[in-house]
Image: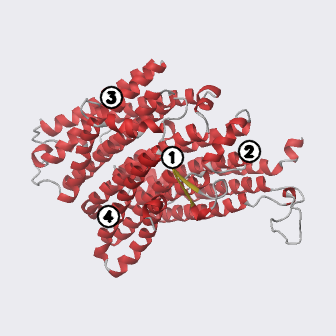
Amino acid sequence: METVIGKYNYWIYIALMMIGFYAMIAKRNLVKKIVGMNIFQTAIILFFISTAYKKDATIPILIKSQEVIDPAKYINPLPHVLMLTAIVVMVSTFGVALAVIMMLYKQYKTLDEDEIIEILRKKK
Amino acid sequence: MNLSEHSSILIVVIPLIASFVNIFLNFLQRKLCYPFFVLVLGICVALSIDILCQVINFGVLRYRLGGWMAPWGIEYVIDHLNAYLIVIVSSMSFIVAIYSKDSVKKEISKAKLPYFYSTYLLLATGLFGITVTGDIFNLYVFLEIASLSAYALVAIGEKRSVLASFHYIIMGTIGACFYLLGVGYIYIITGSLNISDLTRLLPSLYESKVTLTALAFFIVGIGIKIALFPLHRWLPDSYTFAPSAVSAFASATVTKVGIYVLIRISFTLFEPKFLIEMTPLSNILIWWSTIAIFFGSLIAIGQKDFKRTLSYILIAEIGYMVFGINIGNKEGFIGAVLHILNDSLMIGCLFMIAGGVFYRIGSRNIEDFNGLNRNMPITMAAFTIAALSMIGIPPTAGFFSKWYLIVGAVKAGYLVSAVILIFSSLVNALIFFRILEKIYFTKNENTPMYNFRELPISMMIPIVITALAILIIGLYSGEIISSVIKFSLPKGF
């Protein structure tokens, strides 16, 4: 029970990741696929941020008057910084995917993968 | 200021800045875009050779970004393996850049050309970045720069390429995210992202499940990026429908750099003994890659489209390299690393020829290759060299790396894999001799007589250069092994 409730954020990350993964693999609508992709990537952000968290800790800003620095009182800033970079990467991936989807829609007038494959088969 | 001190950062920064400058150049003077693009990649070749010379003379190069010390700041580390890879990537990108001038004009509308050059430079930036960096998160960022520009480049191609590109995006993103999760787990357990720092920290944590999870995520993530057999779905479509120059460049470099990342993760980040003795991973990868070689070759026989045939052959070749890395002896590793060079030349050359044939006859179908010898004798001579190298006929480069791989396989006792390797060579022989027969001996009345001459000179020179390089590297492969590859062997091999 402790592993479920005490680490619930990790369980949420796994659940979100699986939802995203399922959508990317199984959904036939291309927009749903990239929405799944976004959920998948967001789950990873949640994972990284969870690793940085400490109970009763605060943001890592040093106040000059403080003499002794106790690392346990500050959350780890590095995963947050990494995730800022990862968010940029995710946004650009999303942008490229949307651009590709627009091109696909212009070509086939549909966003359903099965219908596109059907059109391609007919052309042959 | 000594410039060559900074060459490891310049090789990333120059193409990055150039790719943006190129777009502005487009507004000023469109004619300048192409010369500028080739010039930048030429500078990269010079820098990469400079880096290789520095590494051979002075050993490992370390460059601290912004002067921050290693475990805290980002560090660029270049040893023999990186330097070798950088030279391959830069020279292939330069050669294909020359080739792209006429080839791309036919396949892409004129207004898009400057953007094509910029994206191409971004892809080169990403690949250089992956090879120079010594930081696993930085590697992720460069991996995504390379992949994003590869998606865009694939989508520029003919009509069907857009759907291929979409599948590539989905698969590539899953791969990259798995890699990122691997980085996350490594960071949780060690608190570091620097590869040399991790090499020191990880051995005491090999028992931990977190390390194993990280390793699993890394391997599957990179497996998708390099299109290892069951995860290869994105590759054949993307490389078939992409513009010829993109297929040539991407097939010659993107997967090879992926193999390099696999080597880094398996043997620098973790110790070889962790993969080979403490986990069954290397055994799994050996069988996995053996299946990849078998199926890649088998599916390649049935294809009619020449570029698609090459894509499946490429999947088999990836299997060769993954196999060589994982058998865990000196011969196998040397064979795999040598095969990175040979394969990038062979597959690059063949894709360029496929593009050349498409340029002239407008078809990629193998059936239409009849009697091409009369029209394009030089290109077809180059094709013959590349095809013989793919099969593994002695004076060509392909023979030597395959020889090392088979010797390694026999030495490690993987006889089935050795047989599969030979089988794959036979299949290549079947595929290429069939095409060669069409080119040189078939005089079919049903196919139209083509009346055109050789390819334009800007397409011919790159093809001839790579074909000659295949022969020359074949003759000097001993030198390459003794001066570069020998030093890149992991500890304990």
Q: Which residue is mark 3?
A: B425
- Callout 2 touching callout 3 (CB < 8 Å): no
Work out how far the residue at label 4 is from the one at label 1, CA to CA, in angstroms.
27 Å
Which numbered disc, 4 or 2, marks the residue that appears first in the sequence? Answer: 4
Look at label 3 and name its amino acid. Ser
Residue furthest toward the bottom? Answer: B28
**Residue at left 65%, top 48%?**
B183
- Callout 4 touching callout 3 (CB < 8 Å): no
Res B225 label: 1
**Residue at left 72%, top 59%?**
A78
Which numbered disc, 2 or 1, marks the residue that appears first in the sequence? Answer: 2
Q: Secondary structure at mark 2?
A: helix
Q: Secondary structure at mark 1?
A: helix
Look at label 2 and name its amino acid. Ile
Which numbered disc, 2 or 3, marks the residue that appears first in the sequence? Answer: 2
Q: Is residue B362 visible?
A: no
**Residue at left 20%, top 39%?**
B384
Work out how far the residue at label 2 is from the one at label 1, CA to CA, in angstroms.
25 Å
Q: Could you tell me residue B460's position as x and y percent? A: 20, 53
Q: Which residue is mark 4?
A: B38
